[in-house]
């Protein structure tokens, strides 16, 4: 541990839920990602500067990275502080784990500067304070893949039980229409109770998806990417959602759905060529609506937060 030392990190976007696994499945993608630089200082306290133009709060109590770092500092006996510079490329409110990237990036970087005193599970716990601030609920399905990389199953939050999965290669096409859906709002419209027949379908799909990933069975992955509980309610917030799904599958996508709480939509494919065809279909849907949108053709990434020397 050295006062004045800085570290730069990249924190990846993450896609929570993975269609049927509401709050329990998520994965990291290679792009987009946020960039941060954190410096360890002797004086207690956290300072935050944003170099992007998203106008996020910089007061540590109101900032997801700030509250995650405060949770970490409360476990330390020595008085230290951090200067944090954040440049976000993952737009807040996109459904691509923007708040998780800030919170997870901050605690991974801080832990490195402190000499790796905390394990990954503790880092997930600290970073979840950021999710609580952002959405009102501690959920770990963005935070965990952001820290671990790859696809992660969160079997339980209390107590935390994380199972990293080893997936086959998967290409990801993402479209982000320029409308904002707040996670808190997208959660508040969900039904509090479900029918047993729907629950049976859902857990069949989750088990099928996890089995498909572990066995590299793409057909099983594809037919398990079905959500009978959340998607029917939330998809009404995303114009063109059904058409995007239909057209993406017609050109060979395995399947997909809402990214986290939306409004971004993602599709999985076996090949880069298919993922690029899917992008064309996604663009066509929003172009015909005159709705501004951004797309990414990327991969499920085995990397979580990556460290670089400053
Ligand atoms: N599982 C969360 C939700 C993820 O869907 O509300 C939010 O990014």
Image (cartoon, grey):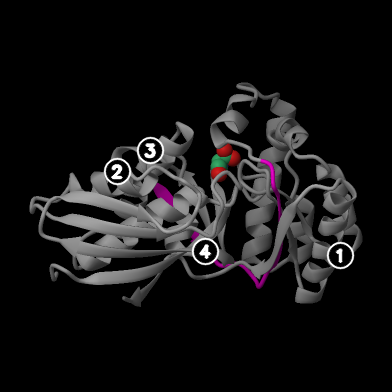
Picture coordinates of residue 291, whole percent (x, y): 79, 47
Is-magenta flag for residue 243? no
Relative side of 201 to 57, left or right: right
Relative side of 1 to 125, left or right: left
- Asked whether residue 81 is in view, the answer is yes
Instruction: From this view, report whether residue 264 is shown above or below residue 35.
Output: above
| Numbered badge on residue 252 | 1
Q: Residues within 10 Å of mark 2 (few under 14, many from 20)?
A: some
Q: Residue furthest bottom?
A: 309
Instruction: From this view, report whether residue 119 is shown above or below residue 103.
Output: below
Q: Which residues are magenta?
A: 158-179
Ligand 1 falls in quadrant: top right
Q: Residues within 10 Å of mark 1 (few under 14, many from 20)?
A: some
The residue lying toward the viewer, choosing from 107 and 48, is 48
The residue lying toward the viewer, choosing from 118 and 205, is 118
What residue does disc 4 label?
A: 33
């Amino acid at each position: 541990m050295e006062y004045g030392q800085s570290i730069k990190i990249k924190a990846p976007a993450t896609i929570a839920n993975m269609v049927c696994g509401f709050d329990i499945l998520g994965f990291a993608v290679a792009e987009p990602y946020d960039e941060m630089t954190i410096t360890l200082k002797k004086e207690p306290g956290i300072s935050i500067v944003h170099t992007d133009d998203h106008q996020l709060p910089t007061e540590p109590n109101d900032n997801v990275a700030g509250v995650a770092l405060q949770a970490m500092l409360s476990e330390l006996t020595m008085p230290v502080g951090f200067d944090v510079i954040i440049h976000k490329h993952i737009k807040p409110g996109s459904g691509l784990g923007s708040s998780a990237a800030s919170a997870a990036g901050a605690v991974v970087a801080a832990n490195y500067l402190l000499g790796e005193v905390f394990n990954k599970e503790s880092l997930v716990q600290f970073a979840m304070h950021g999710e609580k601030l952002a959405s009102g609920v501690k959920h770990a399905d963005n935070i965990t893949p952001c820290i671990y990389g790859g696809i992660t199953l969160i079997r339980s939050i209390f107590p935390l039980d994380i199972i990293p999965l080893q997936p086959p290669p998967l290409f990801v096409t993402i479209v982000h229409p320029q409308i904002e859906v707040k996670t808190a709002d997208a959660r508040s419209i969900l039904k509090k109770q479900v029918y047993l027949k729907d629950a049976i379908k859902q857990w069949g799909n989750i088990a099928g998806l996890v089995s498909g990933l572990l066995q590299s069975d793409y057909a099983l992955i594809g037919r398990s990417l079905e959500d009978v509980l959340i998607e029917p309610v939330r998809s009404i917030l995303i114009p063109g959602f059904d058409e995007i799904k239909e057209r993406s599958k017609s050109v060979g996508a395995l399947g997909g759905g809402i990214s986290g709480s939306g409004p971004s939509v993602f599709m999985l494919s076996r090949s880069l060529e298919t993922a690029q065809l899917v992008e064309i279909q996604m663009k066509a849907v929003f172009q015909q609506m005159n709705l501004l949108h951004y797309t990414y053709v990327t991969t499920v990434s085995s990397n979580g937060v990556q460290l670089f020397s400053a």
